Image (cartoon, rainbow, N blue to C red):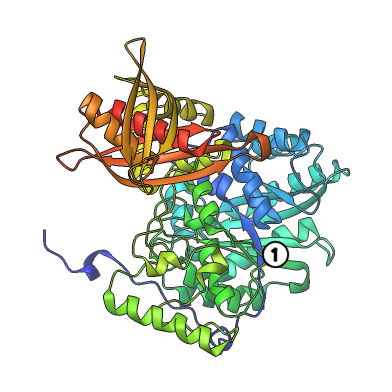
């Protein structure tokens, strides 16, 4: 069937706001941020977070500076309920941080929600029910009065239970879900009815959260809706006006920024925009946009690689390499002309001796995000690490080179595909040890010693003790260094035909516990890569173990 868009879709009716003020406003301070990664983000995951990943995400959000964190929908699942209880009973919630819990406006769900926050110092109870014309007609088959009554009855119970819990400072939040598809005067009417029951004060304000549950119009329309509510809600000084944009049209960030300009005080979103369908609004994007305009976002993204690693591990989803600010390629120029302009920009910046950032193609200094200038100048030299690499580095000090990350992550992916289970960092490290550090094969490295070649002082002679089939033998080779000499000995004694393509090393641990880790990438005669890893207190021994690992893995 052939039809024009006008046959199927009706354009969103503009808001009648002739004297709108928001287009001339400027964002000059950070909003109140509320992370919904653990609830809105979590419900959109292919594999929802288990307890360990949830806790890791919560702690990371606290470290980033979030003061309000929606930690779950405790009445909807035992997992969420238990997680909220764990945070409270194990004193995981720092002073000054409020946990937020979500509930529909149904009696049994509200009561269960209050059970979950018992004992918390501060909590936000987030009540919602859908108010849009479409949901009223299709989902609930109710008129305006019936939908409003749902909100009122829910608000009454929340008020009652909050009064019965004096040991917890409860702040109340109400969302007319699908707000952007609700008549503005009706949304205001329902919010006002809830406000009359909760009786907020300037010291304990009500949060009215106005979500673009589905983004159905341009960001300018959302701003008009927010400004209308900002002007028409009663006792505005007792209200925190909150935004919750989604990204169905790809304009969630613009909608949030316009909404702040239109009078909103608060933004609910997720790190890198994870969420249902095309996602929630990306808090990192908004915050760093503010930062580039000289406004302190009051969130710390100075180590963006760590943020990416944590999010990728917890969500088990990749951050796109072109994602604003966090993507592994956003500070990498492939174009020769771009590279040239960036290099000249750095040179001019150095000559100017100025704090003002002015470099072509780079709207932000990579160092402000903990990224290296090398990632800009040396094309493809820097890449973000995924969840597997994050766990190995975070828990075991193993810093995998990029290509080794790619190879090893495929091994882990195969295991997760086969088991369908979440893998612990201990399990992943065990797989890594067996695959690389303990790679079994033809030979086993025992020890070595080196001496200067009496015929050429720049060369070294290496004698290595090797165990083959249970028997030890000593092999000898000469080269410009231990690695070169060892490769020569392996070729003569075992016919090894590999070439060292890349070598890296680092130290993990401190003092007497320091251990060197060496990584070697070798190529076989057909150019195929073979990786090996070695670990030892002595860096030379670690490098020779890495070569032995690669030789055994090459078969």
Give the quadrant of residue 528. Answer: top left
Disc tally is 1
Mark 1, residue position: 192
On screen, 227 above or below 394?
below
> How would you rate the neighbour count of disc 1 (Cα within 10 Å): few for under 14, some for 14-19, many for 20 or more?
some
Question: Taking 539 as reference, is 240 left or right?
Answer: right
User: Residue 392's spot in the image, x, y percent?
Assistant: 50, 37
Q: Residue at x 69, y 54 (%)?
A: 68
Can you say which quadrant of the picture contains the N terminus?
Answer: bottom left
Direction front: furthest residue: 455
Q: Residue at x 38, y 65 (%)?
A: 249
Percent x, y for residue 35?
Answer: 61, 54
Q: Is residue 1 above or below residue 241?
A: above
Quadrant holding the C terminus = top left
Q: Does residue 378 appear to the left or right of 491 in the view shown?
A: right
Where residue 323 sits in the image (x, y, percent)?
Answer: 41, 62
């Amino acid at each position: 069937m052939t039809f024009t868009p006008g046959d199927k879709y009706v354009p969103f009716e503009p808001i009648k706001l002739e004297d709108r003020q928001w287009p001339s406003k400027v964002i000059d301070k950070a909003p109140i941020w509320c992370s919904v990664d653990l609830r809105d983000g979590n419900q959109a995951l292919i594999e929802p977070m288990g307890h360990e990943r949830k806790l890791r995400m919560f702690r990371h959000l606290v470290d980033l500076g979030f003061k309000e964190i929606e930690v779950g929908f405790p009445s909807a699942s035992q997992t969420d309920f238990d997680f909220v209880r764990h945070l409270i009973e194990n004193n995981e919630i720092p002073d000054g941080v409020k946990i937020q819990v979500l509930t529909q406006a149904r009696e049994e769900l509200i009561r269960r929600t209050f059970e979950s926050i018992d004992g918390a110092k501060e909590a936000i109870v987030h009540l919602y029910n859908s108010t849009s014309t479409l949901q009223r007609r299709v989902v609930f088959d109710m008129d305006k009065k019936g939908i409003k009554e749902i909100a009122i009855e829910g608000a009454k119970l929340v008020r009652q239970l909050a009064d019965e819990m004096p040991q917890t400072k409860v702040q109340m939040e109400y969302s007319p879900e699908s707000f952007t598809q609700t008549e503005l005067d009706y949304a205001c009417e329902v919010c006002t009815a809830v406000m009359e029951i909760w009786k907020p004060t300037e010291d304990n304000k009500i949060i009215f959260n106005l979500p673009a549950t589905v983004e159905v119009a341009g960001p300018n329309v959302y701003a008009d809706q927010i400004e209308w509510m900002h002007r028409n809600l009663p006792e505005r000084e007792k209200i925190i006006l909150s935004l919750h944009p989604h990204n169905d049209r790809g304009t969630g960030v613009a909608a949030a920024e316009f909404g702040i300009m239109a009078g909103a005080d608060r933004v609910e979103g997720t790190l890198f925009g994870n969420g249902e369908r095309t996602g929630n609004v990306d808090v990192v994007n908004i915050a760093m946009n503010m930062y580039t305009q000289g406004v302190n976002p009051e969130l710390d993204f100075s180590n963006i690689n760590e943020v990416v690693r944590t999010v990728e591990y917890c969500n088990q989803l990749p951050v796109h390499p072109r994602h604003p600010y966090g993507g592994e390629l956003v500070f990498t120029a492939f174009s020769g002309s771009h590279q040239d302009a960036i290099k000249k920009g750095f040179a001019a910046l150095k000559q100017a001796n100025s704090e003002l950032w002015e470099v072509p193609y780079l709207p932000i200094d990579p160092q402000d995000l903990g990224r290296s200038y090398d990632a800009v100048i040396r094309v493809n030299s820097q890449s973000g690490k995924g969840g597997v690499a994050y766990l190995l580095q975070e828990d075991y000090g193993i810093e995998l080179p990029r290509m080794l990350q790619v190879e090893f992550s495929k091994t882990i992916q195969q295991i997760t595909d086969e088991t369908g289970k979440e893998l612990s960092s201990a399990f992943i490290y065990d797989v890594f040890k067996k695959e690389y550090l303990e790679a079994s094969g033809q030979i086993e490295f025992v020890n070595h010693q080196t001496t200067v070649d009496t015929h050429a002082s720049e060369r070294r002679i290496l004698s290595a003790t090797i165990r083959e089939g249970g028997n030890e033998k000593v092999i000898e080779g000469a080269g410009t260094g231990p690695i070169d000499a060892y490769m020569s000995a392996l070729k003569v004694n075992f016919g090894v035909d590999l070439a060292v393509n890349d070598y890296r090393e680092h130290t993990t641990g401190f003092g007497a516990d320091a251990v060197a880790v060496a990584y070697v990438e070798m190529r076989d005669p057909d150019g195929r890569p073979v990786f090996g890893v070695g670990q030892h207190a002595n860096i030379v021994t670690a490098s020779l173990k890495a070569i032995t690992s690669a030789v055994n893995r090459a078969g």
